[in-house]
Image (cartoon, grey):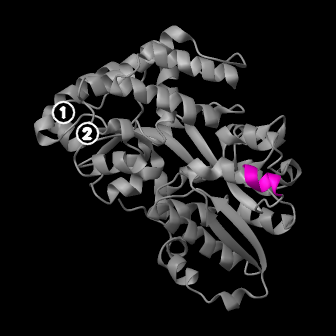
Amino acid sequence: MTIKLDRRALLKGTGAAFAASAMPRMAFAQQAGINYWHHFTSQVEFAGLEAVLTAFAEAHPDIEVTQENIPNPEFMTKVTAAVVADSKPDTSQVTAERVADLTAMGALVDLTDRIDGWEGKADYPEDRWTGITHDGKVYGVPSFAFVDWMYYRKDWFDEAGIAPPSTYVEMLEAAKKITDPSQNRYGFGLRGGPGGQKYIIDVMEAFGAPLVKDSEIGLDKAPAVEALEWYAGLFKEGVVPPSAPNDGFRQIIEGFSTGQTGMLWHHTGSINDISAMLTPGEQFGTALMPAGPSARIARLAYAYNGMLNERNADASWEWIKFWAQPEAALAFLEVTGYFPASLALTKNDAITGNPIYAPAGETLGFGQMPPSFPGLAGWSESVALPAFQQVLIGTATAEQAVDEMIRGLDDV
């Protein structure tokens, strides 16, 4: 897939990033320095970060940013230790589901006054700030967006004479039609390993069992059991790869890209990974997330950058808000395919001129923010995911798994 940008943005967003990253460190001797924690993992994401770092260095030659990768599973442990040791970084990537925990431990700096006085705030509707706001205070600036959608093998669907599914029922029917285990070909790439907890929560909500209802945390047992039975049933029906209980991000992306699976749930952030292997519009297409019996759940998960330490507050603020500026956002889009968080930039020709992005644009009108409450990250990773994996491998029933989840939520 090719995204058309002006020449200046292209230079900032691609090869120039790598040339600048090789500059001798002695050239930055007189610079102010801040550090930035993030949990990017793929080569594409690192290339996108380098593009932003390069653009920032050109705009702010007096500030040097040192990036440090903190793997997602270790992030909260690392931040907690840094708070206890009073060694917090200057800035960090922040996800909405962690805001409540981070503010509870005093890890984030209140940026409300800076944001209210920032001219760029006008480009962001109120919903963009929801995930980074706690008790009326705003703790970060949106940097980019993850818009949920479904990938499907268009060539397989055309061959089978079927359309992309719009409901869970249609999805199972389509998965059965394109599954052929003798060819190591399966209908759907289910993420049952690391990161799979997100989809467990989404499916339960699609069946009418949200984690937060009327400001109360809990689970309605009957629809939650029905949800897990349907979701685990994809594995039992044989329409997902046998490796599904352990498959994480890399496995599901590679499975789809190499012709093992015909449908995949993910978000806009993986478009470049998949386009590198398959031709958009010919071999694969994108579609809205299918609707469950109770709701169509498609998350609008905004990534944020926040300040954790005030020792270099002004320099940190320049870095945080830079991600929201067009030159950074478009450079990051060019390299990664990650959607800008700015409403104005979603109308840029790079997005509106590319039909593959149409479902994401439509999802912006109805998508939901993920749930957020203290303890959610720990519960989802250490309770919900293992409980569901037990259902997948047949060592627990869906009802037993939901009971385990409910007990875990009571502890939270």
Magenta segment's dominant SS is helix
Q: Position of residue 1 (x, y in %)?
A: 35, 59
User: Residue 57's image quarter?
Assistant: bottom right
The residue tagged 1 is 178
Near mark 2 (Cα within 10 A), the count class, few <14, some 14-19 or many ≥20, is many
Among numbered discs 2 and 1, the one appearing first in the sequence = 1
Instruction: Give the left or right position of residue 139, taking residue 40 as reference.
Output: right
Give the amino acid at mark 2.
Gly
Position of 258 with respect to 354 (left or right) is left
The residue wearing badge 2 is 262
Which quadrant holds the C terminus?
Answer: top right
Name the one closer to the observer, 122 or 286.
286
Residue 265 position (above or below residue 113): above
Is residue 312 in the magenta section? Answer: no
Camera sees residue 400: yes
Image position, residue 74 (x, y; %): 61, 51
Report the residue that reaches farthest toward the top: 222
Q: Nearer the viewer, residue 101 or 371?
A: 101
Residue at screen point 20% across, 26% down? 176
Q: Is residue 249 above or below residue 318?
A: above
Q: Are marks 2 and 1 in contact (CB under 8 Å)?
A: yes
Chain part drawn in magenta: 80-85
